[in-house]
């Protein structure tokens, strides 16, 4: 079945550590996105990529980094520079400018 | 800046009643709107969308209404069921050159037995 796979589902990090969240899609979509969701709030855009080897900052990119070496993959690294990284992270893809297809999310907790 | 907001953060309805979830948007350039449903601990799922050249669109048990004059979007769920309990988000596509979606803060719908 086509879809978006995020891993791990749950992740714990010590302060000062970098962690990388995986996002893979087999929908053949050009565009991919990373969102952050905090309790009781909407989704905020971290980074997006419209094509391989190109990505753009979203509204809250500070403390995060991404790469887009393959069409299917868009990993997100949460760096130690992110001061409040505990959140639910959602990856999504789209054909471009339309409906977003979401993964099941990764919950990151900083200990 | 542009934003998408919801009138009510929580909504409780009796099973079998109809639900109406509202959303206000402020970006007049938006021409595409989507409603998503998010169950606890899961990713959002597409419910229904509508383009700005339409006022109403119906799906299975759901209807989206768009009022461009007052920049208002609503989601109507007919005969609400326990499985409809979730957070509902509206989103608009008016932001940025890539027309990425901007999401509202969500409404928690609780269906009472």
Image: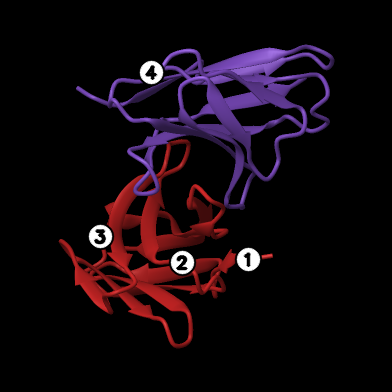
Q: Which chain is red?
A: B
Instruction: Categorize mark 4 by other alpha carbons within 10 Å: few (<14), some (14-19), many (20+).
Output: some
Residue sitting farthest toward the left? B60
Q: Which mark is residue B30?
A: 2
Question: For mark 1, what is the residue?
Answer: B2
Of tags 1 and 3, the one toward the viewer is 1
Q: Which mark is residue B81?
A: 3
Cα distance between the residues tagged 3 and 4? 37 Å
At 25% across and 60% down in the image, what residue appears?
A: B81
Picture coordinates of residue A63 (x, y %)? 77, 28
Element assignment for label 4? loop
Element assignment for label 1? loop
In the picture, the quarter occupied by the C terminus of chain B is bottom left
Which of the 4 quarters of the picture holds residue B64?
bottom left
Q: Nearer the viewer, residue A90 or B42?
A: A90
Asked whether the residues under the numbered discs 2 and 3 touch, taking CB atoms below 8 Å apart as contact, a structural biologist would say: no
What colouring method underlies this structural image? by chain
Question: For mark 4, what is the residue?
Answer: A72
Cα distance between the residues tagged 1 and 4? 31 Å
- For mark 2, name the chain: B
At 57% across and 58% down in the image, what residue appears?
A: B105
Cα distance between the residues tagged 1 and 3? 34 Å
Marks 4 and 2 belong to one chain? no
Asked whether the residues under the numbered discs 4 and 2 touch, taking CB atoms below 8 Å apart as contact, a structural biologist would say: no
């Amino acid at each position: 079945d086509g879809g978006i796979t995020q891993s791990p589902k749950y992740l714990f990090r010590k302060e000062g550590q970098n962690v990388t969240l995986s996002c893979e899609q087999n929908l053949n979509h050009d565009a991919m996105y990373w969102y952050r969701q905090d309790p009781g709030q909407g989704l905020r855009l971290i980074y997006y990529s419209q094509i391989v080897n190109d990505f753009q900052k979203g509204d809250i990119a500070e403390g995060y980094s991404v790469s887009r070496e393959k069409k299917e993959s868009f990993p997100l690294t949460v760096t130690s520079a992110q001061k409040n990284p505990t959140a639910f992270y959602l990856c999504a893809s789209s054909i471009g400018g339309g409906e977003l297809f979401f993964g099941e999310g990764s919950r990151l907790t900083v200990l | 800046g542009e934003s998408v907001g919801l009138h009510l953060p929580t909504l409780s309805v009796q099973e079998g009643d109809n639900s109406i979830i509202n959303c206000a948007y402020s970006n007049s350039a938006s021409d595409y709107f989507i409603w998503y449903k998010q169950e606890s601990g899961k990713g959002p799922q597409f419910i229904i969308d509508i383009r700005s050249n339409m006022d109403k669109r119906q799906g299975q048990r759901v209807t989206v209404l768009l009022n461009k004059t007052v920049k208002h979007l609503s989601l109507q769920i007919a005969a609400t069921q326990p499985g409809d309990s979730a957070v509902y988000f509206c989103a608009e596509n008016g932001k940025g050159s890539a027309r990425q979606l901007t999401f509202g803060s969500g409404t928690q719908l609780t269906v009472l037995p």
